[in-house]
Image (cartoon, rainbow, N blue to C red):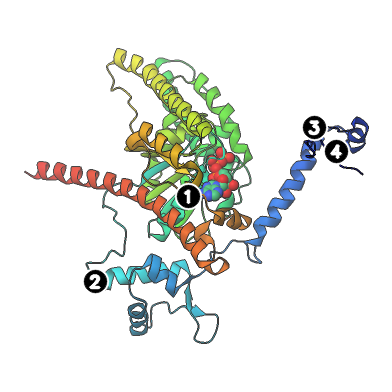
Amino acid sequence: MAKDLTQAGTPLPPYFRIDPDAALAELDAPTDTGGFAAIAAACAQGRDDLVSRGKDDSGTRTLRMFSTWEITRYLIPVAQAHFRRVLRANPDLPQGRSETEGGAKWFTLDEVLRLRAHFAAEGSRAKEYRPYRPDGLPAKLVAVANFKGGVGKTSTAAHLAMSAALDGYRVLVVDLDSQGSMTSIFGGKVDDEWGTAFPLLARHYGEHLRAENQRRLDRGDPPQPLDEALTAAMTMTAADVIRPTHWPNIDLIGAQLNLYWAEFQIPVWRMQARGWKLWDALSDRLAADGVLDRYDVVFIDTPPALGYLTINGLAAADILLVPFGASFLEFDSTGRFFDMLHSTFASIEDGENMAARALGRPETAFEWDAVRAVITRYDGAQQGEMSALIQSYLGRTLSPHRQDFTALIGQAGEQVSGIYEADYRDFNRETYARGRETFDQTYAAFKRLLLGIWRKEELALAAESSERAG
Ligand SMILES: Nc1ncnc2c1ncn2[C@@H]1O[C@H](COP(=O)(O)OP(=O)(O)OP(=O)(O)O)[C@@H](O)[C@H]1O
Ligand SMILES: [Mg+2]
């Protein structure tokens, strides 16, 4: 067939000369509601196949091993020769396995953590083996949020969780997104909403209702009954929904499609009990169940919406990270997100404080230790000018590190993992080093915030107790 050429001799654009009859011939039957189920089933099959690639025969995910090179380079900063000497001198310590006779030694992360504990106890005081964590202070909660979709919330939260775990912190990840991406990354299998944060929120409401009912009874009014679901939630604690992951020091509260139900249920509860502080539900329950003492850092991944679940995550957070790409549309949308944050939390404060003032109660004021916008998927060749502009408007709110776009994430995506789960031998060394470097820097910028905040609180605590003593 002769090619359609314009007069200038160049091919016609592809949207000209489409034959309606040919188009008709290609068309298939209309999709009815059931069609979505068929498409969903095909996707679910594909997803399960992909996820199972990262799993062993028993269906559980296993974390890769870490080599002596990687350990001494990234995790326990000592010379390789010294590392080997210490292992030889301490036959009780994990000795690692090699794939070939005399080849490099590989260790599980559990073993790395044990080795680190040994170095911290026996090694030079001047070296930093364990990350700073003041005693007597609760875990820090970090929410990663932006109502724009696909900006890198889950990737950022997952990589920060893994970095913090490799650094030696005890990490809890809370997935508040019913899409469950974070849950997939950590291999969680959640059957329904009872395996998610939902029962914690329900219990918080149930506790409120019980207290309210006591007041009703005292007044001689009939109590509001707790329905079956609320009654079931009243016996549940965070321990019931926290599950271990294939990372020895990362636990997960997973998500699943049914969690979306919370977006409908929470406003109904709030209508029934105007005094219920729905935004405190997650943080109150995590604190009440001792979670903040058992972990060092809690990362909360949120859906691309400013719904009730996100509000709960944001209100619980000490540190808020807002990822976005250095493009006009993402910058614009992120600005609107901050605007929505302002109006949402200001309206909660106004509503609460009107009543609080009338009753002479303490006023509600939300506060975050730090809020940082984080540029993700950065392409220095294309976005330098745009990001410099963004920097000039956002000032200190913009995190100093721009997280580079890296092909390693897409590739690692096959096993639904991330850079820290990828075996460096599968990549060109340089590509690996660059990809890892950008996420190490993302973590370093976050860790500076974390340490600064903890240090401030540690000093305040010390000043308080010396005041009490003096
Ligand atoms: N630094 C990066 N380099 C390359 N690709 C990236 C990077 N960060 C994220 N991505 C890719 O961008 C896509 C969106 O990322 P991600 O799922 O983390 O965004 P999200 O904000 O959580 O999305 P959603 O709003 O749907 O929850 C993913 O395909 C991810 O692999
Ligand atoms: Mg996400």
Q: Earlier in the sequence, mark 2 or mark 4?
A: 4
**Mark 2 secondary-structure assignment:** loop
Question: Is residue 43 toward the left or the right of residue 380 in the image?
Answer: right
- Residue beneath disc 4: 4
The residues bearing labels 3 and 4 have C-alpha atoms spaced at a distance of 40 Å
Q: Would residue 240 be visible to someone looking at this image?
A: no
Query: Cβ of disc 1 within 8 Å of ligand 1?
Result: yes
- Residue beneath disc 1: 404
**Nearest the camera: 249 or 341?**
341
The residues bearing labels 3 and 1 have C-alpha atoms spaced at a distance of 41 Å
Nearest to the eye among marks 3 and 2: give it.
2
**Mark 3 secondary-structure assignment:** helix
Question: Is residue 205 toward the left or the right of residue 81 in the image?
Answer: right
Cβ atoms at labels 1 and 2 below 8 Å apart = no
Q: Earlier in the sequence, mark 3 or mark 2?
A: 3
**Nearest the camera: 397 or 117?**
397
Residue density around tag 2, few if under 14, some if 14–19, many if 20 or more, within 10 Å: few
Nearest to the eye among marks 1 and 2: give it.
1
Residue density around tag 4, few if under 14, some if 14–19, many if 20 or more, within 10 Å: some
Mark sitting on residue 33: 3
